[in-house]
Amino acid sequence: MYNPAENRYSSIAYKRCGASGLKLPSISLGLWQNFGEKDALEKSKKVIFKAFDCGITHFDLANNYGPPPGSAEETFGKILKSDLMPWRDEMIVSTKAGYTMWLGPYGDFGSRKYLLASLDQSLKRMGLEYVDIFYSHRVDPETPLEETMGALTHAVRQGKALYAGISNYPPEIAARAFDILRDNGTPCLIHQPRYSILAREPEKGLFELLLKSGVGSIVFSPLAQGMLTDKYLGGIPDDSRIGKGSQFLRKESITPELLAKVQALNEIAKKRGQTLAQMALTWVARQRAVTTVLIGASTPQQIEENLAAMTASPLSDVELAEIDKIAPVA
Ligand SMILES: NC(=O)c1ccc[n+]([C@@H]2O[C@H](COP(=O)([O-])OP(=O)(O)OC[C@H]3O[C@@H](n4cnc5c(N)ncnc54)[C@H](OP(=O)(O)O)[C@@H]3O)[C@@H](O)[C@H]2O)c1
């Protein structure tokens, strides 16, 4: 029987999400990988319990996480049922719909039909009555934005989600989405973009928009799926995301150019007394517009290592300039 650590709120910081009343932990845990059908339940539990024991209250899911799609929500549902449900009110659980989930025209993109049916399926898989955040996972160029945002609003009014969010929306469309959601009376809580030393797109207008609009952000793949660690510098370990055969990160990504950048970044991290993973997270968290940094983890040790990055000394102007030189905003 799991009992969370009593001191779980003693060492992690919580930051207000935009102009909302909700605070999120400096680090959130995503279940995109490592929590699917073929991942051992006991291993998944250990990672989730470690996170919760450290004050990580926010768990990020989506309908399609697995593999296969849906299985991460099932795993999370099992863990909730066996262990975590007594602490439901201490947790923020999010899910999304927007990528391909089932066959036919109603299992993909952003129609009201897809989003609301998918949310019902997600709640069933997790055994929950509501999620805290429900996202449109990506822009649907063929569905009116009013319809997609209207579906989020409806989910909130139904009580099946407490807040609405969007993910992977470029600034121009995000700005319109914020207006629609505000007019609907269900303001956008949060935007979820990709952001790391190797993927700096949000610096080109999105962060500015979020600050201006009072919308928070949860930035995903801050370690570029593990490439911003030292693990691939000496080859491809069997127990790494690439070694395990993930369909989302292939060995072809580990090019000599990438390795040269990672090696140079690793030297800066060493001089700071951090691991490269930690420096990459300290770097992401430096942005005022970032509410929480959304990591993945395959072991409890990674969670501990990554959390330490949140209390590290800030990067100096010299260090930031060195990093800019290695990985400039494209
Ligand atoms: N909205 C979207 O479209 C979208 C897209 C992608 C992801 N996401 C969300 O973002 C979450 C995080 O994405 P991500 O998994 O790509 O994040 P990430 O933090 O960039 O990568 C996580 C992976 O890096 C490795 N790692 C983590 N900490 C480490 C450490 N200290 N030392 C060495 N290796 C370490 C682990 O891989 P190993 O297996 O190699 O150990 C871990 O699974 C997802 O779970 C999901 O919730 C959202």
Image: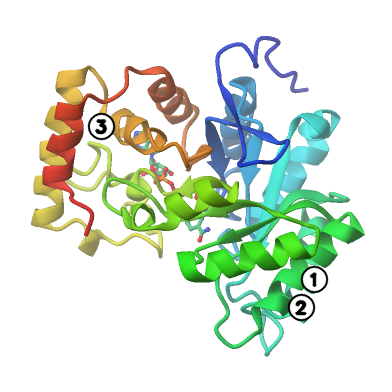
Q: Secondary structure at mark 3?
A: helix
Please name the amino acid that badge 2 sits on.
Arg
Q: Label 2 vs label 3: CA separation? A: 42 Å
Residue 196 x/y as whole percent: 34, 47
Q: Seen in the image, is 1 located left or right of residue 249?
A: right
Please name the amino acid that badge 1 sits on.
Leu
Q: Label 1 vs label 2: CA separation? A: 6 Å
Residue density around tag 2, few if under 14, some if 14–19, many if 20 or more, within 10 Å: some
According to the picture, the residue beneath numbered tag 3 turns out to be: 276
Quadrant position of residue 1? top right
Residue 26 x/y as whole percent: 53, 30
Q: State which tag comes first along the sequence, 1 or 3.
A: 1
According to the picture, the residue beneath numbered tag 1 turns out to be: 116
Residue 223 x/y as whole percent: 35, 43
Which numbered mark, 2 or 3, is in the foreground of this view?
Answer: 2
Which residue is at the front of the view, 240 or 208?
208
For the question of whether residue 170 can be seen, the reply is no
Which residue is at the front of the view, 68 or 204?
204
